[in-house]
Amino acid sequence: MIQDYHDFLGEILIPEAKLKARVRELGEEVSRDYQGKQILAICILRGGVMFLTDLIRHIEPQVAIDFMGVSSYGVGSRESDGQVRITLDLTTSIAGENVLIVEDIVDSGNTLNSVIELLRTRNPASIEVCALLNKVSRREVDVPIKYCGFEIPDKFVFGYGLDMDEYYRNLPFIGVVDLEKYEPEI
Ligand code: IMP
Ligand code: MG
């Protein structure tokens, strides 16, 4: 049985209304910066999905989307080992495009760093990062985040796209996991 999230929810860190307001602001900021240009928004699966679909509703310039599957750690683990695997590649060419990487959270920075390195080899016109959450204190590799939703403390969070062992992505808020109360399915 998958545990009810109420059993391990430490606190609601970012409620739904706050997420909505901030995502709108980010979309407006992106719109101002890319006025008259086309954007290719690349969503990092799977955590970035909710954020992408909400964000692009507030983007006015022409925007296309594509998806990249990246896995930095497996079920049961809570941090990336620096070994980033591409599990699904883009279907469009990014040569000459203004790429906007849309990511749920930047933690050590390993995932984004690898993705940026890979995408650079494909000659886009530009690459910028839009990340909903930023755990600054955990950074191991420096990555340029142009658009950042919220800086958050070093706590494991879930909801609004982010998972605990693949579940709870559907919740409309960002919650903190009380790891002592969380019981993974075995
Ligand atoms: P990084 O490579 O260490 O920056 O890790 C980035 C990836 O780890 C993100 O794309 C998330 O999928 C995942 N991640 C990091 N912190 C959390 C968290 O608190 N909750 C859920 N997923 C997380
Ligand atoms: Mg994840």
Image: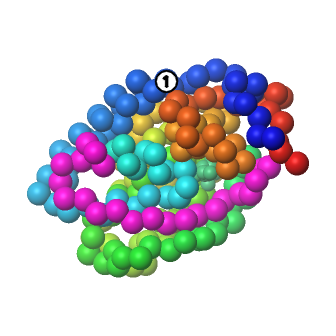
Q: Is residue 90 left or right of residue 184?
A: left
Instruction: Work out which residue is located at the far front of the displayed protein and give it.
Output: 1
Instruction: Work out which residue is located at the far left of the displayed protein and give it.
Output: 36
Which of these two is toward me, 117 or 185?
185
Kindly identify the amino acid type of the residue bearing the numbered disc 1. Answer: Pro
Is residue 111 highlighted in magenta? Answer: no
**How far across and down, in percent of the image, does residue 30 sit?**
26, 46
The image shows residue 182, relative to residue 167, as above or below, that is above
Hey, which quadrant is residue 119 in on the image?
A: bottom left
Q: Residue drawn 67% across and 45% down?
A: 167
User: Is any part of residue 8 visible from this angle?
Assistant: yes
Quadrant placement of the N terminus: top right
Q: Residue drawn 18% across and 45% down?
A: 32
The image shows residue 127, relative to residue 161, as above or below, that is below
Q: Is residue 180 left or right of residue 52?
A: right
Q: Is residue 128 left or right of residue 142?
A: left
**How far across and down, in percent of the image, does residue 44 sit?**
49, 58
Beta carbon of the mark 1 residue lies under 8 A of ligand 1: no
Is residue 74 highlighted in magenta? Answer: yes
Q: Residue drawn 30% across and 49% down?
A: 56
Q: Which residues are magenta?
A: 56-77
Which of these two is toward me, 4 or 166?
4
Q: Which residue is mark 1?
A: 15
Judging from the image, the colouring scheme is: rainbow
The image shows residue 159, relative to residue 83, as above or below, that is above
Q: Residue drawn 64% across and 20% down?
A: 11
User: Is any part of residue 142 visible from this angle?
Assistant: no
Which of these two is toward me, 170 or 119?
170
Hey, which quadrant is residue 88 in on the image?
A: bottom right
